[in-house]
Image: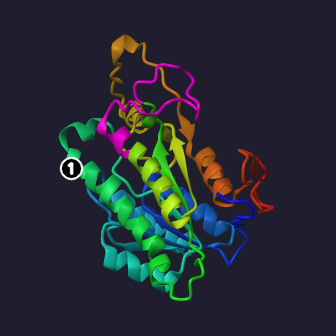
């Protein structure tokens, strides 16, 4: 991002479009942003990768508790997305809609190509559309994008712990490859159109309203039912997990981040409700 690019989350002047708002992280992010006073609209396709009923319960909670409407729609649907942008005019876009999971990608590769790559490009095209339609020659103010990448981009990297400076050019699975493609595509759109964006490489997230396909959820279900937990690799597996509240803290701070040109310095979010980084 360029010097002077501030995106404070300060209240009604902030309009955040959250894709995947009925998902696990999307639900917690949308509710936090609304509680900070931002105008929030969500979009979600309520697909059947895991329980649509759980997703609809999250959407209902967003509506009844925080007044956040979740539009049912597909981010790959250009007409739907374009109409939503024209009506809502977002200042910020938090893109969390995607097809998650590594194992699922082994049997359903085209689902990942569409959801994680085609839909991402469709979102970017919608965001930069004012650039091509602008008649007066002045650069339009485009929304600021924060999107979900993944720790899976590190792939075959053997150095632990991972760092942002580590290589990410050896993906170990298709899911990680699509997320790395998101990062490179976002950079290309910055070069072409000046679209400002930040990708966040999430590590395995857990917490309330979590995904049923995740380990912590399945462990809790097994314990509650008095059933054994299956341990792989002789029980020698170790993995870091991130609490969803900590993830949302980071998302909200990055949504209001200022980067100084020519440096890697990050300044705190311009919102008194959140402590600085």
Residue 122 found in image quarter: bottom left
Image point (20%, 44%), residue name = 108
Residue 92: within the magenta? no
In front of the other: 5 or 108:
5
On the image, the x and y values in percent for residue 223 come to: 41, 30
**Circle 1: element type:** helix
Whether residue 213 is visible, yes or no, is no
Task: Read off the magenta span.
Answer: 155-178
- Which residue lies most toward the bottom here? 136
Which residue is label 1 attached to? 110
Residue 159: within the magenta? yes
Image point (62%, 61%), residue name = 32
On the image, the x and y values in percent for residue 230 come to: 33, 22
Q: Crowding near pointer 1: few (<14 within 10 Å), some, many (20+)? A: few
Whether residue 117 is visible, yes or no, is yes
Identify whether 110 is placed above or below 144: above
In front of the other: 256 or 29:
256
Image point (26%, 41%), residue name = 105
On the image, the x and y values in percent for residue 39 come to: 60, 76
Looking at the magenta stretch, what is its main secondary structure?
loop
In front of the other: 232 or 42:
42
Identify whether 275 is placed above or below 125: above
């Amino acid at each position: 991002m360029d010097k002077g690019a501030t995106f404070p989350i300060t209240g009604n002047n902030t309009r955040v479009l959250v894709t995947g708002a009925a998902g696990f992280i999307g639900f917690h992010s949308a509710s936090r942003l609304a509680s900070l006073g931002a105008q929030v609209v969500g979009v979600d396709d309520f697909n059947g990768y895991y329980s649509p009923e759980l997703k609809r319960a999250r959407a209902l909670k967003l509506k009844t508790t925080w007044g956040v409407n979740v539009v049912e729609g597909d981010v790959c649907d250009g007409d739907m997305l374009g109409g939503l942008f024209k009506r809502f005019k977002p200042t910020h876009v938090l893109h969390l809609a995607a097809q998650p999971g590594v194992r699922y990608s082994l049997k359903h590769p085209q689902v990942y190509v569409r959801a994680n790559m085609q839909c991402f490009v469709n979102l970017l095209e919608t965001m930069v559309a004012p650039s091509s339609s602008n008649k007066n020659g002045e650069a339009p103010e485009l929304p600021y994008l924060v999107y979900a990448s993944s720790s899976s981009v590190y792939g075959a990297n053997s150095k632990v712990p991972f760092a942002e400076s580590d290589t990410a050019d050896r993906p170990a699975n298709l899911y990680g490859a699509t997320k790395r493609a998101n990062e490179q595509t976002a950079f290309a759109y910055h070069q072409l159109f000046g679209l400002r964006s930040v990708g966040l490489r999430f590590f395995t997230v857990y917490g309330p309203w979590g995904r049923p396909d995740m380990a912590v959820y399945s462990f809790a279900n097994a314990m509650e039912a008095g059933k054994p937990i299956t341990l792989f690799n002789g029980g020698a597996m170790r993995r870091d997990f991130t609490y969803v509240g900590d993830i949302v803290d980071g998302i909200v701070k990055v949504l209001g981040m200022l980067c100084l040109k020519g440096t890697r310095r990050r300044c705190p979010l311009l919102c008194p409700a959140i402590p600085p980084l």
